[in-house]
Amino acid sequence: MNDFIGSNISKWWKTIKKLICEVASPPWSQYLMGQTGHTTPLELANEINTFFSELTRDFQPLVQPLDVRELFVPPNLKATPHQVQTKLNAVNGRKAVGPDKLNNRILKEFSQELSVVLADIYNTTLTQAYVPDLLKASTIVPIPKILPPKTIEEDLRPISITCQISKVFESLTLDRLMPEVEHHIDTKQFANKGKSTKDALYLSDKLERVQKRALWIIYPGSDYGEALKISKLESLKDRRVDLCKKYINKL
């Protein structure tokens, strides 16, 4: 097994599939075409696009365009080429490309050469209060929730793929804003890096059960093991005592 350390796992797995003559399954779009009555992939794609676009048709811009030529930006908020290069070196080269069609491997391979240009673009977006439309665009890819999918409305999930440069700029912005606001964030704030969402899922399940049966969590009839089984959060069994300590004391 030591020989496999550092090897290209993706290439190795493709070779194994080729050796065993594994037959690829038909694409899920063919199943969906049969269910929806479309005769060509183009018709199916157009209907999927129409459905996804209808979901956000009524959305309004969060902020109206500012009529400014140049804003004063404190030096500590601007990015340096070294900081940009560090972000580019951390890019996952195997991630899908966004609307800009820039391969992530190129961004990573030429991080030193691109860092100066990207740092200047980032700083310009701050001083001019303007972000190019391409950096705000995204490619929506439909991913089936189940295989095979039967309906567009229920069985497809839209996955948004943004430009990798946009993600780099977002990370640079977060590095500058987070130290200013982190002491104001509630300790029970979830969905942040380093804070597991499992506790949030566990507590939301408990609150839902309390709404349905307000007394069950207090009385000895409570079955925590069954609750965990239903919510499929087996990894939280060791945490349940800490989370429900005051209720267990009553039991």
Image (tube, rainbow, N blue to C red):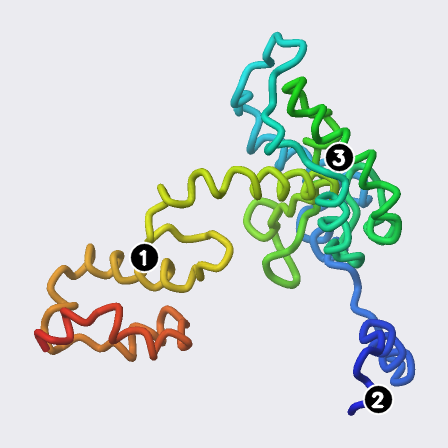
Please state which amino acid type lies under the numbered disc 3.
Ala
Q: In this image, 205 relative to 108: left or right?
A: left
The residue under label 1 is 204
Mark 3 to mark 2 CA distance (whole Å):
41 Å
Mark 1 to mark 3 CA distance (whole Å):
42 Å
Q: In this image, 154 relative to 19: left or right?
A: left
Please report whichever mark, 1 or 3, sits nearer to the chain's N-terminal start.
3
Q: How crowded is mark 1: few (under 14 residues within 10 Å), some or many (20 or more)?
A: few
The residue under label 3 is 119
Image position, residue 158 (x, y; %) = 62, 45
Residue 163 found in image quarter: top right
Query: Considering the numbered disc 1 on the image, is that residue within a helix, a strand or a loop?
Result: helix
Q: In this image, 162 relative to 207: left or right?
A: right
Residue 135 found in image quarter: top right
Q: Return the mark for residue 3.
A: 2
Mark nearer the viewer, 2 or 1: 2
Image position, residue 184 (x, y; %) = 35, 41
Q: In this view, does 198 lie above or below 192?
A: below
Mark nearer the viewer, 1 or 3: 3
Q: Is residue 18 above or below residue 176?
A: below
At horizontal 63% and vertical 41% (from top left) the residue drawn is 172
Mark 2 to mark 1 CA distance (whole Å):
45 Å
Instruction: Assess whether mark 3 and mark 1 are in contact (beta carbons under 8 angstroms).
Output: no
Specify the quadrant that holds the C terminus: bottom left
Mark nearer the viewer, 3 or 2: 3
Instruction: Assess whether mark 1 and mark 2 are in contact (beta carbons under 8 angstroms).
Output: no
Q: In this view, does 20 lie above or below 41?
A: below
At horizontal 43% and vertical 59% (from top left) the residue drawn is 197
Specify the quadrant that holds the N terminus: bottom right
Foreground residue among 243 and 67: 67
